[in-house]
Amino acid sequence: MAAKSCGWVASGCLVLGTLACGARSSLPVGERADDEPEVRLEAEPACGRRDGGRLTAYLEIVLDGSDSMNADNKWSAAVDALDQFFLRVRNEADPQLAVGLLVFEDARATLCTQAGCSLPGANDVFPEFVSLNHYDDLVNRIHGTHPAGSTPTAEALEASYRVLEVRDPPYPVPAGGRRFAMLISDGAPTTDSNRALDVARAKASDAPGIRTFSVGIGSYPADLGYDPHFMGELAIAGGTRASIDCETSNQSTSPCHFEVNPKGTREQLTKDFLTVFDRIRALAG
């Protein structure tokens, strides 16, 4: 029987046939422009998966803790949604998924200076199987703090890539998993945005590569301080664009990235975040 792996918005589903032990195949993921790096989804033999269907994935969540996240319930909704997402992953006890968390410029982080950024920080959490202890570490990182600083997106992404490259998560997560960063941000970078795009593009092109999901907290037309153009360009650079027809314009209604509109209630925001997280998790593994 073939196993389906659904692509992101408007890119349909890829069908991966079951492979014999030792065999390996790959298919391109999503749609891309001619000048974009091709990102491929590796189809592994079922015997290499503990559940016979899900691929091993290492997910590093990169959460914007800049001061603008205080507005419109954005921070509280993100924390609520992450709490529920972490609890869901803990209860599923899936050894195929490792989750880590890096928060930048919140009150518990060491803020960036002209000399650079100390990322990841001492409070950040490396990707591991979400055991009871690891769940506590993830939840504790986003409680007892609040947004505080600026938005050094390039530096935060670079730190997340180092985290994903430095080591495989420990047992029981299998070695050799696919690696993903997920940026959650509401605003334009306060440092070089082109640097962020360049490093995301380079990491998506590397072998085995790191893909970057982009989750924007804002609405169209663009809110003051929100940069959907950058968030869309990051999705493209990171190999996770919605479709070949998506747009990165600040006025677009067909964005290339995932988006959460902060204009609703805290409960609706939390629900929207969870929908995005679940879709990204399905794509990652």
Image (cartoon, helix red, strand yellow):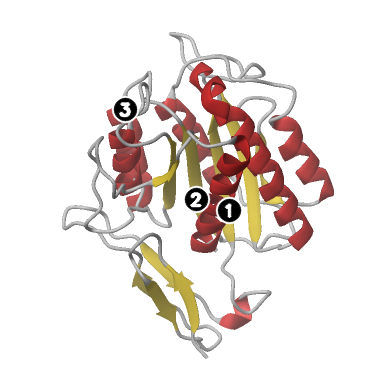
Question: Residue at point 37% right, 46% down?
Answer: 257
**Which of the two discs, 1 and 3, sits closer to the camera?**
3
Question: Does 116 appear above or below 204?
Answer: above
**Pointers 1 and 2 in contact (CB under 8 A)?**
yes
Residue pointed to by mark 2: 180
Q: How many labels does the image show?
A: 3
Q: Distance between the residues labelled 3 and 2?
A: 20 Å
Question: Does 114 appear above or below 216?
Answer: above
N-terminal-most mark, 3 or 2? 2
Residue pointed to by mark 1: 58
Q: Distance between the residues labelled 1 and 3?
A: 25 Å
Residue 253 placement (x, y as % from top left): 29, 46
The front one of 60 and 269 is: 269
Question: Residue at point 37% right, 22% down?
Answer: 225
Question: Residue at point 71% right, 31% down?
Answer: 141
Q: How far apart are marks 1 and 2 (CA)?
A: 6 Å
Residue lying farthest right?
A: 132
Query: Is residue 163 at all visible to an observer of this figure?
Result: no
Tell me if 103 is positioned left or right of 40 in this view.
right
Residue 33 placement (x, y as % from top left): 19, 56
N-terminal-most mark, 1 or 3? 1
N-terminal-most mark, 1 or 2? 1
